[in-house]
Image (cartoon, rainbow, N blue to C red):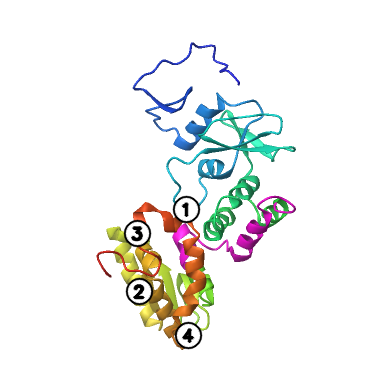
Amino acid sequence: MRTTTTGRAPRRRSSRWVALAPGVRLRADLGDEDPDWARMRAWAERLPDGTIFTGLTAAAAYGLWLSPLPPDRPVEISVPRAVRVRRPQVDVTRHRLPPHSHGIGGVRIATVPETVLAAAGRLGLLDLTVLVDGVLHEQGCTRDDLDNVARGRRGGPRLREALALADARSESPWESLLRLLHVACGVPVEPQAEVRDDTGRFVARADLLITGTRTLQEYDGAVHRDRGQYARDRRRDSRLADAGYVRHGYVAPDVRFRAAMILREADEALGRTYDPTRLDAWYALWRGSLWEQDPRSGQNGPGDEPADGPD
């Protein structure tokens, strides 16, 4: 095991430190320091040379779009094949050739493409597609970078599935989820569509425009509850109505629990009969995701109303 390079005496137990594992402690007051990077640095002092942080640990440190992760998830690392690390708090992958990485802030972390590939082995398709949406939208790497790293590698087939569904135009995880709900149900949508009136004058940019219609499907996040934003939204709604557009705004509980309502409104816009069996593909994605397991969603399935009933 690698020892610290500070030359200081071992840390004594103190209320100023939080024990992550035997011999691994994190300062209780991190100040402005990012907790994910602080956690990696604390572990780096006790892990062997050649350790590379990867997977969901690296994804959280990069600030990528992640589904709700268990708070007690293990630290994910990659080490040389000859190295043995036996700690229950650490998820170890042993490599013959190390994943591409770089040193940042005193730790060695996998590059973004390598991080996404490692996460592909641990995430469901819905979670992974949202992650890829965010990487592409924020230009953490290119689609070609992800396609190349997937070739002949563990996790590669799942990553290619996610790439086929991914769209860099999504601007938030919940917007990605709303888009994927429509795609899974066979509803053609255009993300970040420019909406114009009959004279060609720009009216607004829409999260999702149902192709061939004047119906907008949008995710209304917390920012829309701000008083100033609320007033701007109402003015925007008036402009859209004047131009002949219908706007449906959805919040997280709608995506979680009211997929049938969203599909019904999309089917109405398309002029087709509502068919609940179209939801099967969406439910399969949802039930294989960490969003479904998020304790904040309660015990309801994706087709159920929450315990207090509909809004």
Element type at marker 4? Answer: helix
Viewer-nearest residue: 193 or 168: 168
Check residue 67 in the rendering and tell me which mark sits there, or answer none. 1
Give the amino acid type for the residue marked by disc 2 in the picture: Asp
Residue underneath mark 3: 299
- The alpha-carbon separation of the residues under discs 2 and 1 comes to 31 Å
- Identify which residue is drawn at 64% across, 56% down: 159
Give the amino acid type for the residue marked by disc 3 in the picture: Gln
Check residue 270 in the rendering and tell me which mark sits there, or answer none. 4
Give the amino acid type for the residue marked by disc 4 in the picture: Leu
CB within 8 Å, label 2 to label 1: no
How far from the left and from the top, in percent, is residue 116?
Answer: 61, 49
Q: Earlier in the sequence, mark 2 or mark 1?
A: 1
- Identify which residue is drawn at 27% across, 64% down: 307
Element type at marker 3? Answer: loop
Element type at marker 2? Answer: helix
Q: Earlier in the sequence, mark 3 or mark 4?
A: 4
Check residue 237 in the rendering and tell me which mark sits there, or answer none. 2
- Identify which residue is drawn at 64% across, 49% down: 117
